Each structure stands twice: as C-alpha cells, then as structure tokens.
Image (cartoon, grey):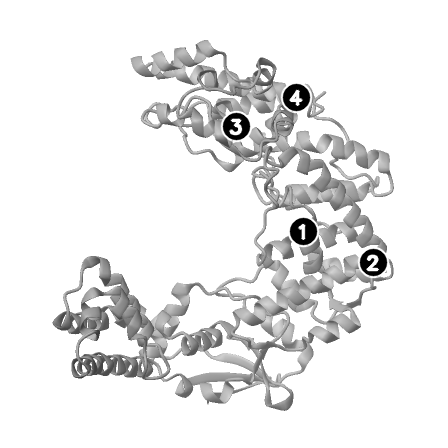
Amino acid sequence: MVKKQYEATAKNYSELADKLTVPKYQRGLVWSDKDKQEFVDTLANGFPFGSILIRKGDKGMYTVIDGQQRLTTINDFKKNPEKYWSHLDEIEKYKEFQSLSNTLVSITDKEQPILKDFFSQAIIKNSNEFDVNKLAKGVKGFSDIFGKSTNDLLDNLSRISEYIKKARQDLEKYVDVDNIVIPIIEFTGPEENLPSVFENLNRTGKKLSKYQVFAASWANHLITLNDTQIEKGLIESVINRYDRMTKARDNIEISDYNEQDIRKGRELNLSELAFGIGDLVINRLKSLITAKFDDDDLRDEYGFATLGIIVGIPNTKLSGIAKKFKEREIESNLSDELQILDNILQSLNKTFERLLEKPGMISNKQKEYENGLSKNFKILSYIAALWVKRDNKVEQQKILTFLPSYYLVDDLQNLWKSTGDKRLSSYYVTPSDGTPMKSYSLPVSQSRYKSAVESWIESDKDNASIQIKSVVKTIVTMHANLKYSHYYANNNVTSTDFEHIYSKKSLSEYYSENNIPGASVGNVMILKTDMNRSKHGKNLYDVSGTPDPEVLKNMVYPPQEDFEKVKQAIKNKKFGTIRDPILKREKDVFDSMANDLSIR
C-alpha cells in the first residue's frame, strides 16, 4: 500500500497570518475582482470552501503549495474591507446616512458625491475620528451648521458620529477574519515531490500555462551565471519579478528566495533563466514588441521559446530543454551564447526601429512605434533565422535586409494567424540535411507581393470602417518612413497624427451602411499635428503650408480633382464612386513601397 503523504486539519486564519511563504514556481495571481468578491461572499455567508495545501517549513513557517489566491484575498479583505463590503452593503447603509444627513441640511445633486466620499472614507477609519472639515467645505448646508453655536455643532457632530460608529461595527462584523476556520491539508512527503504535486493540483480550474508547468519541473535545475552585464541584467529581471509577486500577494514571502543570495551567488534555476531571457528580448526589441512592465506571461513565452532556439529544440517539445541544456553543456558557454543573442536582438531592433518609429515625434523623450503587424512567434522566427546564421555575418545581413518585406507580406497573407509553433520551429530545427526548412535569406518575389496586396485589397474593399486600426497605422507608418519621413525631419516637425485623407467628418454618416473603407490604408496618412488641426475636414490643397508637389507625390496624395469627385459623390449618394479612389490609392501605396522593401 502506498504511504499517504498528507494530513488533514483546520486552522484559524490568525494562526497562519505572518507565517506563510509561497514557492518560486507558484504562478502569479490570476483571480479577477469578481472571483475575489465571490470568495468573500462565501466567507460572509459561512459557506464551506476549498482547502489550502501547505507544507511546514523552518522556524514555524508554512509554504503554500495550493490556495494562495484564497489566502491573498483574505489578506486583502482584512486590509481593505470597504472594497468588498461596499459591493454588498454600502448602498443600503448610504441611503440611511443620506436620510440622516437630509434631516440636517438640504443637499444638492452636485454635493451628493462629496457626501458619499465622506461616508466611504469615514467608515473605514481605524479611530472614532473623521474629517468633518472636508464635508463642511464641500456641502454648503453642513458648512452653515458647523458655523453655528458650539452646542449645535456638537449635537450635529454627535448624531453623525454615532451613525458612523454603527456602520463601522457592521463592517467589522461582516467577516470575522481572524477567526475564519481554514480547512488545511498539510503535505508531509519529500520536498522533491512538491513541483509534481503542484502541477497535479492545477490540472483543473484555471489551467497552468506550459511555461508555469516547466517552472515547477525545473525548480531545482540550477545554473550559475557569470559577472557580465547581460547576465547581471537577467538576475535583475528575476529579482524585479519576485518583488512584484511579493507586493501583489500582500507581502507573503516567497520561499527559497533571497535577493542578496541571488546577487552574490548569481544562481538561477532554468525557468528563471528563461524568464530573464524573455525580459531581455522584450527590452531589446522595443520597436517590434509592446509589453506591459508586469506582463510575466509574455516574458515567459519569449524566454522559453528563445531558450528552445538556443538549444535547438522544437517549440512543441520545450519540456526537453533541460536535457538538451545538459547534453550540449550550454552552461559552460552561456555567456558567449547570450552575447550572440544580444547582438542579434540589437541588429533586429535597429532594422525595424527606422521602419516602425512614428515620424515627426522628435520632441518626445520616449519613442513611439507602430507594430500592429507583430505576432509573438513571427518575431521569434526572426530571432531563430538569425541565430541559425550566427557564424555567417553576410547571411545575417541578407536576412536583415529582407525581413521588413516579410514582416508586411506574411501579415497580408495571414501566415501567423494561429500560434505558429510548428512554423516557428521550421526556421531553426534542422532535418537530416542540416538545413532548416524555412529561411528569410531570399527576397520576397514580385509575384508573391502582388498576389498578397491584391488579396488584401479585395478583402478590404467592402470593409466599412472609420476608426483607424493598429494594422493600418503600422502599414501607413512603414509607408511614411520609406517615402516621406524626411519631410518631417527637414521641417523640424515635433508632433504628427494619423489623418483621414477624405475626411472622417464627410464619411462618418455614410460609411457603415455603404461599406466605405474609410479607415483603410488607402484613406490614411501621417500628417503633422498643426496642419491636421487647421485642416478641419478640408484637404491639403485648401490650407496653408501644403507640402510641395514632390512630397505630395511621395505621400501618394490624391489629385485635387479626386476630392471634388468624392464631394459630388457624397452629395449625389453615389457611394461606389467614393470607394474607387480610396482603393486606387491603397494599391498605389503598396506599389510605391515595393522597391524600398527589396521586393524582387
């Protein structure tokens, strides 16, 4: 008979408070506000809830294996009860308070928010004092009352104070946090089984990503880094991640984590290394990747996939990274491998930043990029193709020359619409002949480019639109940078906008019912902000400061007679006539970029 590796018990919350840690491989918090509210409802109603799985550690501490969402929600409720209590009770309580207040003064609609804010703040104070000055200043009636005799003032304050006390007492009774009885399962098995237990527990409910499963499996696969700037950066990325996780969990500590030990020993496990590499990729490729500072899942995806590229394992078989890492003795050459990767990332970003940076934003400290054609695996395939040719600078330069055309054409043809695991792997996993199945070392052919553009325009011609989407902004930005960004640079333009050529104002009433592609590539350009504001629904021929004819030609700006035709078409409700010049310009924009994109 298999020996049982757990014991069931129960503990009051007060017995666990300040004694909890979470293991490194635990995922970040995933409960929504609704999830947390529903759990507090469960507590308030005295209903049973799922057990917490813990393991007793050193010095009386407990490691949370499963249940951190529940414990963190209880912690949050204890610190910020009004977030939960007000959802259920505040409306009734506030109505009573409102009624009390209205017996004292007449409160206008404009003053109601001030009264409510006072109530909300007053009931969560830890003492019996609250700021009546704010109420006196904001609500005229109360100001008059507080300005009366001392006896009247004290009497009115006393009436308000008694109600506030009662409301606070109700709040405290809503959930008696310290005496919540928490069902506990204490894991008594060996520590090396913890990652497997964690993975098994999360097969249902909110599914772990494959990267979170790897984090559990590789928790004890340790790697010592060298003292290079890149490796220092990886360590800082991991430390920042754990700091964010600790704050998000109301400062529940992470077990086996010590910031100073990591800095001094420079030791990360394999999943932490992958995360750090993902952060490096995102930070280096700012022109291609837009990421929130706390999007750890995205960093995991880029990091684990890039690690797969480095060790040469398909993205569908990343679970084998640890074995490959050992077989190929990657750790002994890791500094060199990371330097090669960093060089690739910087070359890749340099190629695309001049293509995707929004023109005419020189006054901004932070550059703005339009990367609406970026897909995660698509960008990873660029890293993979360059990694394969890491020992051949000539081939790498060819790839960098041709990548912008693939960035555009592959999106026009929806080649990366799905996640693209297998497609990504085909750029770096070598079959028996040693050559990956796909490469970016050859130019996009004219026939393929023409076919992709025609297909795009055909699908776009009846696409009723007026709001400019990210994909269109990206293509328009590419066109501007290839054909007319010098106009903004030479004229010291400090701000630009995306602007409808045939004005949004003139089309907004008709575009939807008549399938007018008003926000397509054919009807959008980048225009300096001051000119855009002065245009007011007109065209560039009707405003001062119009660019010279050569610049207008590079912009593929329609001739003046086309604006008159569209104006008459709108007047006569001949909406097919409106689509024609938009679609013609769309084709002309794509055609004008072909040579600059090295289409051959």
Can you say whether 213 is above or below 316 in the image?
below
Q: Residues within 10 Å of mark 3 (few under 14, many from 20)?
A: many
Along the horizontal axis of the image, is 394 left or right of 42?
Answer: right
Q: CA distance from mark 1 to mark 3?
A: 29 Å
Which secondary structure, mark 1? helix
Q: As shown in the figure, which amino acid type bears the numbered disc 4?
A: Ala
Q: Which residue is mark 2?
A: 334
Q: Residue at x 77, y 41 (%)?
A: 386
Query: In front: mark 2 or mark 3?
Result: 3
Q: As shown in the figure, which amino acid type bears the numbered disc 2?
A: Leu
* First-in-chain label (2 vs 4): 2
* First-in-chain label (1 vs 3): 1
Q: Which residue is mark 1?
A: 283
- Which of the image's four quarters has the N terminus? bottom right
Q: Quadrant of residue 210?
A: bottom right
Spot occupied by residue 499 in the image (x, y as percentages of width and height): 47, 29
Q: Which residue is mark 4?
A: 594
* First-in-chain label (4 vs 3): 3
Q: Which residue is mark 3?
A: 527
